[in-house]
Image (cartoon, rainbow, N blue to C red):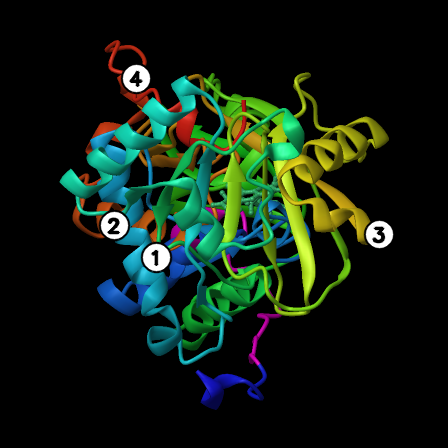
């Protein structure tokens, strides 16, 4: 997509916050902005205000490791993430902006008999529900990724993998900016440095929000607040099945280009890919202890780096350049929550945990459809908040890339 390289994203910030909008979206992360973008571009609903307490992409959407894939472990998730993967493939054409989308292929390595069974099952299920994944043997893994030590440092031998050739990455902040620009171009207002401090209810209905810049009325309020969602939802007396956990990641200095695939291992609890600048980007498990702390820890860094070295020994030559943390909205079943909240006029898009970057286009598309038509799209119907009360969880811990 070379024609996009030199173009600067044009963001037009409004001066004043209006007293009301048809739709108010809380949170200027990928999910909030994608909802606004599709409302405007697909449904012609442009009287939309996005309210962001800091700057757009300052939450997890600007902190993630940018992996896009659809190789999930339950049919509902495979269908949903496959839709998102396809929307990502066309997002540069749709927005006219370069998001640095690159198909790399993703290897999900198994080191135990149980891991082998899981990856074989993943491949079969993915194929049945429309995502391209195949099970491959160690010599095929080595051909795709010569840097892998098949002996796994002598402790974690590589026994096989599921291979997802459409696995990709895209530059996270460019995704955020492109969606924001597309929404703004259609008339959506995005307000940065404006925090939501209250949800306004009249009877059983949400009718607006209080912000640090004054009250705003709305016909529909959408919460897309990442790890902060429970604090805002509680302002309407709503208790969500969400726990906020820190998730850390780090990058090394640059290295010769050549780690072409994205490499993941559930048993070693890490995944790695090479950025366009040549750095190796590594992430893994959430912090056990729920908290809102953005502090990065040496414990995580040394443990994760040690595990990554077992599979990718060349990392020993590299130095860690930067480490950071985001706060993830984790659900008990490791699947997202999208749709009504039980309070009229109040919708939610949450539970994106460690996996929601890849879901930004499909999540936004589905939420916009729900707002515009009043109907929950079939694609996201299984992900409703009421699934917990109805005892219909969508357990998919094995696909989250964390534990
Ligand atoms: C280290 C790390 C690695 C990850 N790696 C991947 C990956 O490789 N692939 C993948 O698919 N997913 C990954 N994720 C998860 C992914 O980043 C998130 O699920 C996704 O970005 C969530 O988007 P969001 O829009 O829901 O939330 P966010 O991007 O967090 O946006 C929420 C916004 O709400 C704002 N906000 C909060 N409170 C208020 C308030 N009171 N008023 C107004 N605004 C408020 C915040 O400032 C923030 O900008 C990773 C996450 C982390 C932290």
Above or below: residue 184 compared with residue 87: below
Q: CA distance from mark 4 to mark 2?
A: 25 Å
Residue 4's spot in the image, x, y percent?
Answer: 49, 85
Q: Residues within 10 Å of mark 3 (few under 14, many from 20)?
A: some
Residue 122's spot in the image, x, y percent?
Answer: 29, 33
Q: Which residues are magenta?
A: 9-28
| Mark linked to residue 132 | 2
| Mark linked to residue 166 | 1
Query: Residue 166 is drawn in which quadrant?
Result: bottom left
Q: Residue at x 75, y 33 (%)?
A: 306
Q: Answer with mark 1 or mark 4, whichever residue precedes in sequence.
A: 1
Q: Residue at x 32, y 14 (%)?
A: 388
Q: Residues within 10 Å of mark 1 (few under 14, many from 20)?
A: many
| Mark linked to residue 319 | 3
Q: Residues within 10 Å of mark 4 (few under 14, many from 20)?
A: some
Q: Which residue is mark 4?
A: 393
Q: Residue at x 63, y 46 (%)?
A: 59
Residue 204 in view (yes/no): no
Q: CA distance from mark 1 to mark 2?
A: 7 Å
């Amino acid at each position: 997509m070379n024609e996009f390289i030199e173009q600067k994203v044009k963001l037009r910030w409004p001066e004043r916050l209006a007293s009301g909008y048809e739709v108010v979206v809380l949170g200027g992360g990928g999910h909030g902005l994608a909802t606004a973008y599709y409302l405007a571009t697909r449904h012609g609903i442009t009287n939309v205000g996005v309210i962001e307490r800091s700057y757009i992409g300052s939450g997890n959407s600007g902190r993630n490791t940018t992996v896009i894939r659809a190789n999930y472990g339950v049919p509902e998730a495979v269908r949903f993430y496959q839709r998102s993967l396809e929307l990502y493939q066309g997002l540069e054409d749709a927005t006219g902006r370069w998001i640095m989308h690159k198909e790399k292929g993703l290897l999900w390595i198994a080191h135990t008999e149980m891991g082998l069974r899981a990856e074989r099952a993943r491949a079969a299920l993915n194929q049945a529900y429309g995502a391209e994944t195949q099970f491959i043997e160690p010599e095929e893994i080595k051909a795709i990724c010569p840097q892998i030590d098949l002996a796994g440092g002598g402790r974690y031998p590589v026994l096989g993998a599921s291979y997802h050739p459409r696995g990709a990455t895209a530059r996270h902040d460019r995704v955020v900016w492109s969606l924001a620009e597309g929404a703004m171009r259609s008339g959506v207002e995005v307000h940065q440095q404006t925090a939501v401090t209250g949800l306004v209810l009249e009877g059983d209905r949400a009718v607006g929000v209080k912000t640090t810049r004054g009250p705003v009325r709305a016909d529909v309020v959408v919460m897309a607040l990442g790890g902060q969602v429970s604090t805002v939802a509680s302002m309407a007396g709503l208790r969500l099945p969400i726990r906020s956990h820190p998730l850390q990641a780090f990058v090394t200095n640059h290295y010769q280009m050549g780690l072409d695939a994205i490499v993941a291992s559930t048993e070693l609890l890490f995944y790695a890919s090479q950025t366009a600048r040549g750095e190796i980007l590594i992430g893994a498990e959430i912090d056990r202890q729920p908290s809102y702390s953005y502090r990065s820890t040496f414990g995580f860094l040394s443990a994760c780096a040690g595990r990554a070295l077992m599979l990718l020994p060349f990392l020993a030559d590299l130095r860690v350049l930067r480490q950071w943390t985001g706060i993830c909205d984790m659900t008990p079943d490791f699947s997202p929550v999208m749709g009504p909240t039980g309070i009229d006029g109040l919708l939610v898009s949450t539970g994106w945990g460690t996996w929601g970057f890849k879901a930004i286009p499909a999540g936004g598309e589905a939420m916009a459809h729900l707002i515009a038509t009043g109907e929950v799209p079939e694609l996201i119907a299984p992900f409703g908040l009421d699934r917990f009360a109805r005892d219909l969880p969508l357990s998919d811990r094995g696909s989250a890339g964390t534990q």
